[in-house]
Amino acid sequence: MPTRTARTAWNGTLQDGSGQVELSSSGAGTFEVSFPKRAADEAGGTTSPEELIAAAHSSCYAMQLSALIGEAGGTPQSLDVTASVTLGPDNPGFKLTGITLVVRGEVDGLDAAGFAQVAQAAKESCPVSKALTGVEITLDAALE
């Protein structure tokens, strides 16, 4: 299996410094990071580790859910997955305090109960969910 790489170049102190995160494996882009913007309510055009984790989690979950829907005899027409990752205080520093996954799906061949069952199984078996077992992950799943 492949290994994927990202690189961060950081300059300065935590409060006054900033950095650039490069998605090295894909070459998809380089994104600005800053601690003050990370801890603020408004991101101001920068990303954060939490947003990158949310992106990884939502995409991984969508792939896993698609696979499990197929295994359950359904056909996913569309899945809309949002992951929200919350940063909070810890002693010392900060920690991820929770992740909320919200999925809305258009699926042929599964009823609401069947969809809820595979959605929960995907939450438990997605590789990113497994990597984040120290964080409470909640799920809101429904068919449209």
Image (cartoon, rainbow, N blue to C red):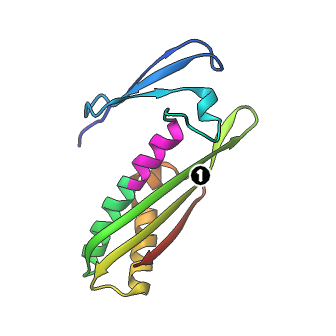
Residue located at (47% from left, 48% from top): 54
Q: Is residue 110 above or below residue 83?
A: below
Residue located at (33% from left, 31% from top): 23
Residue 24 image-quadrant placement: top left
The one nearer the camera, 66 or 127, is: 66
Image coordinates of residue 21 in percent, x first then y, are: 42, 27
The stretch of residues the image draws in magenta is 48-58
Image coordinates of residue 120 in percent, x first then y, are: 46, 71
As drawn, the residue found furthest toward the top would be 12
Q: Amino acid at mark 1?
A: Val
As drawn, the residue found furthest toward the right would be 91
Image coordinates of residue 108 in percent, x first then y, are: 26, 82
Image coordinates of residue 76 in percent, x first then y, are: 27, 73
Q: Is residue 91 magenta?
A: no
Q: Quadrant of the N terminus?
A: top left
Q: Is residue 12 left or right of residue 19?
A: right
Q: Is residue 16 left or right of residue 71?
A: right
Q: How many marks?
A: 1
User: How dense is the environment of label 1, judged by Cα within 10 Å: few (below 14), some, or many (20 and up)?
Assistant: some
The one nearer the camera, 44 or 33, is: 44
Q: Is residue 101 above or below residue 127?
A: below
The one nearer the camera, 36 or 131, is: 36
Residue located at (38% from left, 64% from top): 80
Q: Which residue bears the numbered disc 1? A: 135
Q: Is residue 103 above or below residue 18?
A: below
